[in-house]
């Protein structure tokens, strides 16, 4: 394969992911939708306080503003049982309630399959300008069941941030056409 092809593809993916306002310091006052999907395996119990601190400081402290949509789901087992922990329009006065619900997610033994939750998140909400999906995984084998069950395409455009004992996977759902268009424009210009 051509090394230049991989370099250009990496630039295109950085451009596409860089266009997501979720990591921006400031954003327009356009409501967004955030889907937070959490691994409810036993491994979560050892890092739930760090996850809660991240949610308090970053997600609820800097990303979400009043009027944004927030859905928090826990996923259990290889059958991918999805439990909705919170779903609604974010109000800053609900921050402590949301954090308590997050800390109280029960832990189960096995690593979950995130496919069902990702399919549901991918159906999107047309009432919001942008939809962002984040997976929190604490299991060392975190995405293995999802990849084994055919969820590889759902994770095609994803980015992982590693923390001590857990990770956040930002998943670009429904962006294949945008990536293809951007790549075609890029390759046509070079």
Image (spheres, helix red, strand yellow):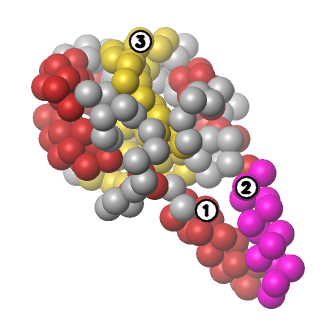
Percent of width and height locating residue 167:
35, 46
**Residue on which disc 1 sits:** 16
Region of the chain picked out in magenta, as a range: 177-190
* Residue that appears at 86% across and 79% down: 188
Q: Residues within 10 Å of mark 1 (few under 14, many from 20)?
A: some
Spatial distance from mark 2 to mark 1, Cα to Cα?
A: 8 Å
Q: From what the image shows, is residue 97 above or below residue 140?
A: above
Spatial distance from mark 1 to mark 3, Cα to Cα?
A: 30 Å
Which element is circle 1 on? helix
For marks 1 and 3 on the same chain, the one whose residue lies earlier in the sequence: 1
- Using the image as rendered, state which of residue 157 and residue 29 is in the foreground: 29
* Residue that appears at 51% across and 55% down: 20
* Residue that appears at 52% across and 17% down: 80
Disc number at residue 83? 3
Label 2 close to label 1 by CB (< 8 Å) = yes
Q: Quadrant of the C terminus?
A: bottom right
Question: Would residue 54 be seen by someone viewing this image from the given angle?
Answer: no
Percent of width and height locating residue 162:
33, 54
For marks 3 and 2 on the same chain, the one whose residue lies earlier in the sequence: 3
């Amino acid at each position: 394969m051509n090394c230049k092809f991989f370099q250009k593809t990496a630039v295109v993916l950085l451009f596409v992911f860089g266009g997501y306002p979720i990591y921006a310091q400031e954003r327009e006052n356009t409501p967004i939708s955030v889907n937070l999907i959490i691994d409810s395996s036993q491994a979560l119990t050892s890092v739930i306080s760090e996850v809660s601190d991240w949610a308090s400081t970053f997600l609820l402290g800097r990303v979400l503003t009043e009027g944004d949509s927030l859905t928090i789901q826990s996923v259990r087992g290889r059958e991918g049982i999805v439990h909705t922990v919170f779903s609604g329009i974010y109000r800053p006065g609900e921050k402590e309630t949301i954090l308590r619900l997050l800390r109280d997610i029960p832990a189960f033994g096995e690593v979950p399959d995130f496919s069902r939750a990702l399919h549901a998140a991918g159906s999107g909400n047309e009432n919001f300008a942008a939809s962002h999906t984040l997976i929190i995984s604490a299991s060392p084998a975190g995405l293995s069941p999802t990849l084994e069950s055919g969820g590889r395409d759902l994770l095609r455009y994803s980015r992982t941030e590693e923390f001590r004992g857990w990770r956040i996977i930002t998943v670009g759902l429904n962006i294949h056409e945008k990536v293809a268009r951007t790549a075609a424009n890029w390759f046509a210009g070079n």
